[in-house]
Amino acid sequence: MQGPPDPRERLLGLFGAGGEPSFVEAPGRVNLIGEHIDYHNLAVLPVALDRRIRVAFRARSDARISAVSAEYGSREFEWTAQLAPVARGDWENYLRAAAQAVAGRWGSGKGVDAVVDSRLPAAAGLSSSSALLVAFTLALLEANGLEASFTELMEILPAGEQFVGTRGGGMDHAASLESRAGCASLVEFAPLSVRPIPVPEGWGFLVAHSLQTAEKSGSAREEYNLRRAGGTTALARLGFASYREALPVALDAALRLQRGPERDAFLHVTSEALRVRAAVAAMESDDAVVFGRLLLESHASLRDQLRVSCPALNQLVEAAMESGALGARLTGAGFGGCVVVLCRAEDRQAVRRGLVDRFYAGRAGFDERIHLMDVRPAPGALHLEKK
Ligand code: GLA
């Protein structure tokens, strides 16, 4: 997982001497609250992690894209204006998605030789795939002397990811690009905006992995797309143009829906949107107790209404609460992956130890450095110091 110490040497070793390599990095994110609602254009509250995807690259004179990852192997393809996906689940799809996203706006250009390193666990709900898409897109732009604003990137990136088959929203890309150190990001859509919300000093967030992966490009993808479709159908049935329009009258409106997955999705989406508002207010007024309660309510809604949790995630939430946390919930798309835990900063070690004793003890494959991380709210790719 740990990247090699010198990606420059690695690039020169793999691709031969030549021009000096450039570097771009894009962080993963943990979503604090606002789950399964970004694709309905409702506000969410993620934090960028200090774990990133890093790309060392050098422009080529032809249009070939050649990338090597210690974890996932080497890939090479010709950058043409119209690229098709390769086999489902193959990491080349993210490289292709980046190339396609850039080509759709600026046309295809010079290819790159690239070395890709990740310090983010894959399929953990921490957006390693979006971070890869963001980093590789920035590399292709830079290799071609192009500069894109945050807004322009947000116009091409979420749509680019649909190339891989997940009809996700824009939360992951916004967090990976635009986050500020020490802050959560209140991301709003239509119109797009990102407001940094400082995380109070006395708060501690942890991310704990359930040890079950949720392949976004694989089996979890149909389930994810079904949740999105359920919420969209419910909205259409009720005759609203948007969820924002539905919010003020959501409870009455839900009575007009038949019991079942569509109504449940509608109830989750509308209640989660209100929890995001309340969570921002709690963070701004340094009320960790209220924020923790909102995390638990969000988890219950994701578990019981949207049904995207699993036993390991539920056990982790319980273990966190028994260990002195103020709140916890599954984060990301669900179906495995991670939970985010809030505790008082001074209780962080005790909660970590409690999670190890109550949840991880005796589970095969647990590595504390990978599966249990302290959240240090980090800057996004557009605010990182250029190396
Ligand atoms: C995935 C998607 C995001 C978001 C979350 C669920 O991470 O990429 O856009 O929809 O699931 O909140």
Image (tube, grey):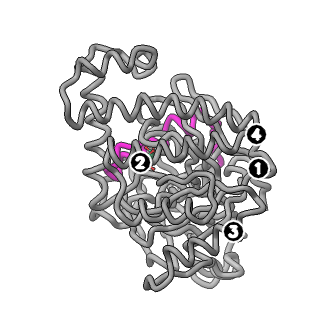
Residue 164 in picture, x, y percent from top left:
35, 53
Magenta stretch contains residue 163:
yes
Give neighbour class at mark 1: few <14, some 14-19, many 20+ (Cα, 10 Å): some
Query: Foreground residue, 276 or 190?
Result: 276
Q: In the rendered image, which residue does mark 4 sit on? A: 286
Q: Is mark 1 within 8 Å of ligand 1?
A: no
Q: Is mark 2 within 8 Å of ligand 1?
A: yes
Q: Amino acid at mark 4?
A: Asp
Q: Give the quadrant of residue 54.
A: bottom right
User: CB under 8 Å between callouts 1 and 3?
Assistant: no
Chain-order first, disc 4 or disc 1: 1
Rendered residue at 38%/19% (across/down): 250
Give neighbour class at mark 2: few <14, some 14-19, many 20+ (Cα, 10 Å): many
Q: Amino acid at mark 3?
A: Pro
In the rendered image, is residue 143 in sight? no
Image mark for residue 181: 1
Residue 317 in picture, x, y percent from top left:
49, 59
Q: CA distance from mark 3 to mark 2?
A: 26 Å
In this view, the mark in front (3 or 4): 4
Chain-order first, disc 4 or disc 2: 2
Q: CA distance from mark 4 to mark 2?
A: 36 Å
Q: Secondary structure at mark 2?
A: helix
**Where 39 falls versus 328 (above or below)?**
above
Q: Secondary structure at mark 4?
A: loop
Residue 323 in picture, x, y percent from top left:
60, 66
Q: Secondary structure at mark 3?
A: loop
